[in-house]
Amino acid sequence: MQNMDATVILPILKKKLAFLSGGKDRRSGLILTIPLCSEQTNMDELSATLDYLLSIPSEKCKARGFTVIVDGRKSQWNVVKTVVLMLQNVVPAEVSLVCVVKPDEFWDKKVTHFCFWKEKDRLGFEVILVSGNKLTRYIEPNQLTEEFGGSLTYDHMDWLNKRLVFEKFTKESTSLLDELAVINNGCDKGNQNDKERSMDFNFLPSVDPETVLQTGHELLSELQQRRFNGSDGGVSWSPMDDELLAQPQVMKLLDSLREQYTRYQEVCRQRSKRTQLDEIQQKVVNWLEGPGSEQLRTQWGIGDSIRASQALQQKHEEVESQHSEWFAVYVELNQQIAALLNAGDEEDLVELKTLQQRLSDVCYRQASQLEFRQNLLQTALEFHGIAQDLSQQLDGLLGMLCVDVPPTDGAAIQQTLKLLEDKLKSVDTGLQGLREKGQSLLDQISNQASWAYGKDVSSENKDNVDHVQGVMEDMQLRKQRCEDMVDVRRLKMLQMVQLFKCEEDAAQAVDWLNELLDALLKTHIRLGDDTQETKILLEKHRKFVDVAQSTYDYGRQLLQATVVLCQSLRCTSRSSGDTLPKLNRVWKQFTITSEERVQRLEMALAFHSNAEKILQECPDLAESVMDFEQFDEVEAVGKSLLDRLTVPVIYPDGTEQYFGTPSDMASSAEHIRERIRMICLKKQQLLETNGSTRES
């Protein structure tokens, strides 16, 4: 099986769809564990994981066969069945036993539909269903991981990280050996002069040999140390088969690297110092001081929008990419100059140091300008981004101000007003951010002159400054216009809130009058049992009428206020054609009812007053004629009052209303009838007294 790199399927390997824990069965075969989860397992990813894991052991190890543990305790039976059948295609000849770990209380019915033991010949391996706590019947506990009740320690991420380090080292060292072989063999051919070889061969490998050697030594040291030491808990630990195989490979690569690197170092020492200096001059200084500097001289704009700034950033990144290639060459050559300084002759030291200083000055100057330019463009991009967001906020605010949607009530007006205030506050915040970012951008623009390389950039800088200031001034003017419009809209909305409040209060006044009228008809029924009580009721009624009058006047004032507000807002009040007629109608009904109540109370007062006068006095015989007339008058008033109690209150629209219920009226009438009977009795007594007097 062809080896594959872990990096190719690294996201899949991290999922731990399958793993080799290092444990072995009783036949010394490796244990391959497939822990199925509750979620659906991707069979393609599982197949790729198995292909990778099975490419690691040696052929000798594979010949002993594998024991596969399929942990189905958290999975469904059809997934377990698919995985077992998949093993037939992935590793049929290398699997000797498959242990399917089942849940304690499930699958019984499903297993009856598919018996693996009947399929042994077709599958090529034996499949057993076993509970997790009975797995030790087939595998020793010290060869099982903790999830199966064993004591074997396995850290999947630790294993994966070491595999990545091993594969990376193998790939880098193999590539480095090929490069060093080409360099060393190229320098050994013929009697070419040093200058020609310096032009034909690249003496700098793609990776640092020292770094690769150090990585290899650290990897080998850890592999060897893990072979003899215990794990974190101090328990004796045996290395996995792949780690035993890795040790000789690492040792062999390290030996080859040391040999080739030693030859390479000798080749480097033999190179001509003059050739090295010429190469530095040609590859770095000339380009940086020529085309590189010219590229930077032409880059001064900041763009007038997000898209323009992004385009300039992209162009700058291309310039940076070209410079990065030469900076990389500079780093490599600087290392070589340092080596020449350490091993150079005394007469070359001054020249080498001068060249090194010149090279450093040019590179650092170019790098500083590239960084400054990148920061400038980033600030410009952020400035234009804030300006665009602020412009959109202003457009939204202006659109909201230009659309005059009449609110339905005061709450809607308050909500709209709050929304306007929030938008205006957001605009204030955005404008403040724009000013701060704009000032930062202006400060950076003013510093561009120091990177001009003798070029007059005053005109370019002036255009940039004018653009930034123009954007800020335009946003300020737009914001001021919106503020003015918000002030006008705020005043109008506050007037509308007041209008709705007046209309609501006027409607409330109508409701109150209706309630007062209802109370007058239903509860103001008693006429009093005597003169004193009737006077009290009459006084209470006058106060009751005063309250109603105040309510009516309040409603009229509110409706007059709505008329004034509507004239100011140039709109039509809903209450002008609805609330006012209601108010007048209920007030008319109240006044008619109140007058009827007053007349009844006054009649009752006259009745009780005269009745009490008659009942309390004892007239002489000489006054008997006058007394009889008083009796008749009081009796007539009482009967008129009784008749009036049976008459309803008639309103202008023809509707009728009675005071209280019939039982309430009957109660009041009964007391009046009682007094009339007392008057009649008194009259009878007087008649009898007068008759006796005449006979004597």
Image: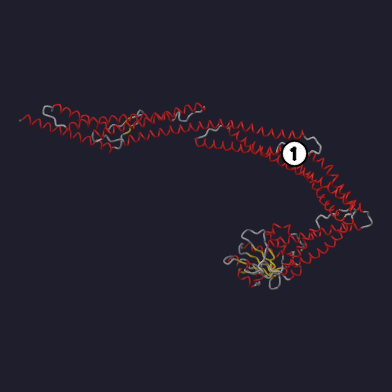
**Quadrant of the rendered structure where residue 465 is?**
top right
For residue 45, above or below residue 531 = below
Q: Secondary structure at mark 1?
A: loop
Residue 638 visible here = no
Q: Pick whichever, 80 or 474, lies toward us.
A: 474
Quadrant holding the N terminus:
bottom right
Residue 575 location (% of width, % of height):
45, 30
**Quadrant of the rendered structure where residue 679 is?**
top left
In this rendering, position of residue 390 left or right of residue 248: left
For residue 365, above or below residue 682 = below
Q: Pick whichever, 504 or 121, lies toward us.
A: 504
Task: Please name the residue shown 38% across and 33% down the image.
Answer: 513
Residue at the spot of label 1: 447
Q: Amino acid at mark 1?
A: Asn
Q: How is the image coloured?
A: secondary structure
Quadrant holding the C terminus:
top left
In this rendering, position of residue 645 left or right of residue 586: left
**Quadrant of the rendered structure where residue 514 is?**
top left
Residue 521 visible here = yes
Residue 479 location (% of width, % of height):
62, 33
In this rendering, position of residue 173 left or right of residue 604: right
Residue 88 location (% of width, % of height):
70, 65
